[in-house]
Amino acid sequence: MIFGLSPLFALIPLVLYIVLAFRDIHPVLNVVICVVLSAIMTQQSFSEMGGILGDALGSFLGLIGFIIMLGSALGAVLRATGVAEFIIYAFTKKIGINTEKKAVLATMATSIVVVALLGTLAGANAIIAPMIIPMVAMIGLTPSTMAAVLMGAGMTGLFIGPYSPQVITIMELTHMSYGTYVTGVGLPVAAICWVVTYFMALRIQKKTKGIYAYTDVEEVNMEYIATPQSKRATTVFFTCMAVLIGYGIYLQAGSSYAIMVISVTAVLTGIAGGLSLNKLFDEMIDGAAKMVWLFIMFVLFTPFINFITEAGAFDELVNLLTPLFQSNSIVSFSAVTTLTGVFGISGAATAESILLDSMFKPLVENLGVSATLWGTILLVASQITSFAYPEADMLGQMGLARSKDMKNMVKFGVTVAICCIIYVFIRSLFG
């Protein structure tokens, strides 16, 4: 440490990162500032920084950033081939949108599936919203209701998607298989969100009907007929995903396997949808380009965390916190870590999970916290932040739903957050 300071001072850049995350500052700029500050404080050599950043490109967070870019590329292919539109109309037709409750369920089901398959909330719901809003508007759903549905259902798609970034991250940190993760972590939290979203959506609909309404929405073609190419591409898409994901689960493949799943599926789907190879790769590159900023952020986040870790700051923090858990209370530990994540840290969920794991992993091992409980804490602590108060994800879903009703959205988000935190408390009673 510079000037022989205590390792605890290495946490200053981390505190600054958390503060700036709540400000109107670009996430990449935030990390750049904190990387530079942490490098200075831990006396990193300027001449070695290039090599450090080069190594970060091959880090786990770098891998996650690349997977996110590929997911965005796949989303672009699904849009170009008509697969996304076909999936949306298939789900809504299957459920049959003729009542408000069915409209809510149809939107939830569509959002969950598309987000889970693409592994991105904003990208998937951006595809869904323009197609489904004209349908639900005819039934009378309000923008306020749609905002809550897109947020609640879409987020849960990230909880259970086999290759969504957050799922891959938690599986890597806890060494769980996908089967163990989805039954012990993802599905229980998702189920809570589903129930709360459904009933809160109906409540918001009742309160806002006649106050807010969609105006000037596009005419919807309820007699939509898929082209042979889009049908063929959809069949190839689901077949590829099922086969490759199933094979990956059988092999217990690592997170890097997601690269093959997404890449192969995107290429085969594009070819089946009639795209020329030039057009296919143009679409993939255009889609991936939208997430380059996140990839850069994740690459920079690696040395940021490493500098703090190597300085011994997290070890010192654990030494300070250990007396708080002298009774080996897993319940109190769960409460502290969950609330720290939900209300104390903001930013990309995968980066937040890695940060929490770096901070508290020694205590997890000392207290004997199970992998599924720790996975649940990481999931709730990193993802429920988006519900706890208005930030990018919440505002983004309101924008897609064309809603300006912040009051009801905040009430909805706080309800989800409280229910999930209570679940972690109850879950911690069983170790």
Image (spheres, rainbow, N blue to C red):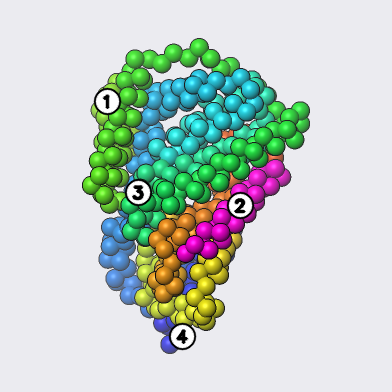
User: Type of residue at label 4?
Assistant: Leu
The image position of residue 403, as x and y in percent, is 65, 36
- Give the mark nearest the N terminus, 1 or 2: 1
Distance of label 4 from label 2 (alpha carbons)? 42 Å
Using the numbered discs, state the Cα–Cα distance from disc 4 to disc 3 in whole angstroms: 43 Å
Give, as a three-letter code, the residue at label 1: Ile
> Disc 3 or 2, which lies upstream in sequence?
3
x then y, percent, for residue 13: 49, 70
Residue drawn where x is 39% and y is 25% of the image: 83
| Circle 1 crowding by C-alpha within 10 Å: few under 14, some 14–19, many from 20 | many
Could you say which is closer to the camera, residue 16 or residue 134? 134
Q: Residue lying farthest left?
A: 251
Query: Which comes sooner in the sequence, label 4 or label 2?
Result: 4
Residue shown at 58% from the left, 21% from the top: 97
Compared to residue 405, the image places residue 210 above or below, namely: above
Whole-percent x, y for residue 363 in the image: 44, 73
Look at the numbered disc 3 and give the secondary structure of its residue: helix
Q: Nearer the viewer, mark 4 or mark 3?
A: 3
Nearer-N-terminus badge (4/1): 4
Asked if marks 4 and 1 touch (Cβ < 8 Å), the reply is no
